[in-house]
Amino acid sequence: MADYKGKVVTITGAASGLGKGMAARFGEKGARLSLADLDAENLGRLEAELKGKKVEVMTTVLDVRDGEAVDQFAERTFAAFGGVDYCINNAGVHSMGTIWRIPAAEWKKVFEINVMGIVNGIRAFIPRMMAQDRECFIINTASNAGLQVNTGIAPYAMSKHAAVSVTESLAVELQAVNSKIKAYVFCPGLVPTGLSYNSEKIKDQCDPYFETESYKKLYAYGARLLEKGMPMDLAMDRFFAGLEADDFYIRTHDSEEEEVSYRVRMVLERKRPAPIAK
Ligand SMILES: NC(=O)c1ccc[n+]([C@@H]2O[C@H](COP(=O)([O-])OP(=O)(O)OC[C@H]3O[C@@H](n4cnc5c(N)ncnc54)[C@H](O)[C@@H]3O)[C@@H](O)[C@H]2O)c1
């Protein structure tokens, strides 16, 4: 097992769900944590919990859409801890609906958080991590949705395909310059978290689209599916197992292999994907 004692770990979207699960596990393993989130209240609560367990932790309230704020987060972390071993760009939101009905502002928001949030993390942390000139790791949270054909969640799926793609490019470009930084893309399947609830909090509350019956039905369906997901503890076991096995695509759910191979088959056979039977 890898030794995380004293290692410095940064996590965005750390106040809830998978980010919080990672923070707790890294903390248990003796890592020092620099955590960021939009949600000041939950972040403050987590900081207190971790400090109660004697974990060394600092927190930053930020919006990953704001490149300057992410740069300052990196600056603060390097100043406080003297370096970064694991940089985890994890903040994200969900989004659902029929493609041609979803408001333009919703598409923009999801892209800016789920994709540009990661790009902002890469731009802020990679140059500083390169300057350390030692082995270190960057992990971007995408989703199994970024590996397969999806339905009813187009903004989310688009953003997660982009998150996978940017991390693949990053991995290749880092190797091309013989960098000591290793890139990974985390592609979990469903895990019960605050994703549905938290994503609702930052949607445009005034847009009548979100008041339609079809949207409300879809939202309730999505929230129910999430609840039936893999328990967080098991998802974290899989996350650390993937990381330690040096899996570039860190996956949690074997059941999704069929959906990943379906997409690849459609590409190779030049076929139009059909609606997914659930
Ligand atoms: N839960 C799942 O089933 C699942 C599956 C695949 C991928 N993911 C991905 O995992 C990541 C974490 O999601 P989660 O399921 O733990 O949800 P979550 O809502 O429980 O946690 C996400 C955290 O990100 C924060 N956040 C959202 N927008 C932000 C912003 N602009 N700036 C800073 N922080 C922001 C939220 O406040 C929240 O604390 C996301 O990228 C999500 O897409 C989740």
Image (cartoon, rainbow, N blue to C red):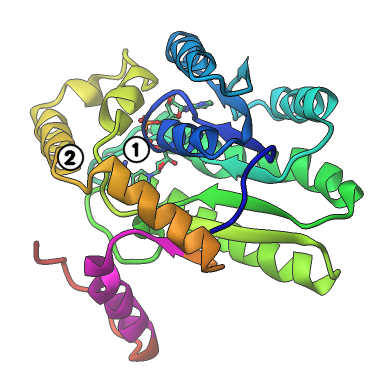
Residue behind mark 2: 222
In terms of image quadrants, where is residue 181?
Answer: bottom right
The mark that comes first in sequence, 1 or 2, is 1
Residue behind mark 1: 94
Residue 98 at x, y percent in the picture: 23, 45
Residue 192 at x, y percent in the picture: 24, 38
Q: Is 22 rendered above or below residue 200?
A: below
Q: Amino acid at mark 1?
A: His
In terms of image quadrants, where is residue 70?
Answer: top right
Left or right: where 179 falls relative to 9: right
Left or right: where 261 falls relative to 18: left
Numbered-mark total: 2
Q: Amino acid at mark 2?
A: Gly
- Dividing the image into 4 quarters, which one contains the C terminus? bottom left
Left or right: where 22 falls relative to 55: left
Residue 207 at x, y percent in the picture: 30, 19
Q: Nearer the viewer, residue 220 or 212?
A: 220
Q: Is 217 rendered above or below residue 126?
A: above
Residue found at x 18% / y 72%: 274
Residue found at x 24% / y 75%: 258
Dominant secondary structure of the residues highlighted in magenta in the image: helix
Task: Check mark 1 vs ligand 1: CB closer than 8 Å? yes or no.
Answer: yes
Label 2: few (<14), some or many (≥20) within 10 Å?
A: some
Label 1: few (<14), some or many (≥20) within 10 Å?
A: many
Question: Mark 1 touching mark 2, by CB under 8 A?
Answer: yes
Magenta segment boundaries in residue numbering:
250-267
Residue 253 visible at all: yes
- Residue 86 is marked as none
Image quadrant, ligand 1: top left
